[in-house]
Image (cartoon, grey):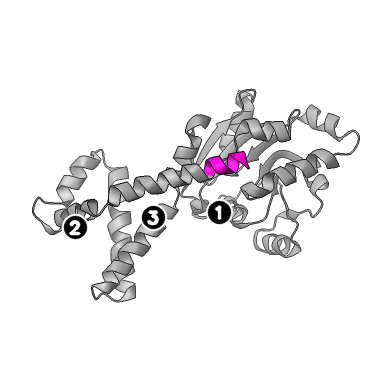
Amino acid sequence: MAIVFLGGGRITSALLAGLHLADFKERIIVHDRNAHKLRALKNRFGVAVESDLQRAVEKARLLIVAVRPSNVADVLKAIREGARPGVRGKKKERGVIACSLAAGIPLAKLKSQLGPPVRWARAMPSPVARTRRGLTAVTFQRSLTKSSRKKIKDFFAQFSTVLEIPENRFDAFTVSYSSSHGYHALSVLATAAQKLGLDRKTAYVAGAHALADGIWSWREEDVSLASLLHEAATPGGIAATVMRTMDAAGYPKAVEKGLRAGVARARKNARG
């Protein structure tokens, strides 16, 4: 039995990179319909690959569904309709756990598309998992046993911090913790700095330190965020002026609007 990834795209590549850094020893199999993706992953990480969907599924003790939300229904339908005689009973005996990485698709829908003997979890890892510094949110089908939940958490803990989130808060958490926030903030900050005259390299170094140093300080110290903001932005000073002007220009509302749009996108995935 193996951990089987269905989908050989960017998130699978990131997770495999994190597992490689962690010196993960369990057998891993990747299925994808694109042969060039399978070759690239096999060459880079030494994983086994399987072009046949049913053969891949039959080898899974943990099935990671790592395809786009719009493709999940088709993949699950193919698994459901392609199961050969005797396969379903075999699955039931060994208790396959399936974990979807598709944003927005709830457990109830996953279960309706591929139900017992398959039991479901959802996870939302970050591409930062490639460096083993990411974060993974997980949520579980109620019938999933404690031992099965622990197996899933232990797997994602190989390359990230793991937080269990109630499913009714899962989408809100997903849109809030994405590493895209940091990348986007760095891009915007560095672009603005270049317009003030800094060269590109210096602008990105300054922006990266502005974001990363402050956040790491907050994470490592037992000091409130409000206290750190007060320390960094002296009333009447430059930093305070910058923050006040950004807030007046609609920065807090823009962030909230963006998160709400992300949740709406996730709910659209659920309906699709």
Q: CA distance from mark 2 to mark 3?
A: 19 Å
Q: Residue at x 79, y 55 (%)?
A: 51
Q: Mark 1 or mark 2, which is nearer the start of the sequence?
A: 1
Q: Which residue is mark 1?
A: 21
Instruction: Say what amino acid the circle numbered 3 marks.
Output: Gly
- Name the residue that disc number 2 marks: 242
Disc 2 + disc 1, Cβ < 8 Å: no
Residue depicted at 49% across the width and 53% down the height: 128
Circle 2 or circle 1, nearest the eye: 2
Residue type highlighted by circle 1: Leu
Give the quadrant of the C terminus. Answer: top right
Q: Quadrant of residue 189?
A: bottom left
Chief secondary structure of the magenta span? helix
* Residue assigned mark 3: 182
Element class at badge 2: helix
The foreground one among 233 and 269 is 269
The residue segment tinted magenta is 266-272
In the rendered image, the vertical position of residue 213 relative to residue 198, given as above or below: above
Quadrant including the N terminus: top right
How many labels sit on residues?
Answer: 3
Q: Residue 9 appears in which quarter of the rendering?
A: bottom right
Closer to the camera in the image, 33 or 104: 104
Q: Quadrant of the rendered structure where residue 182 is?
A: bottom left
Magenta highlight on residue 191: no
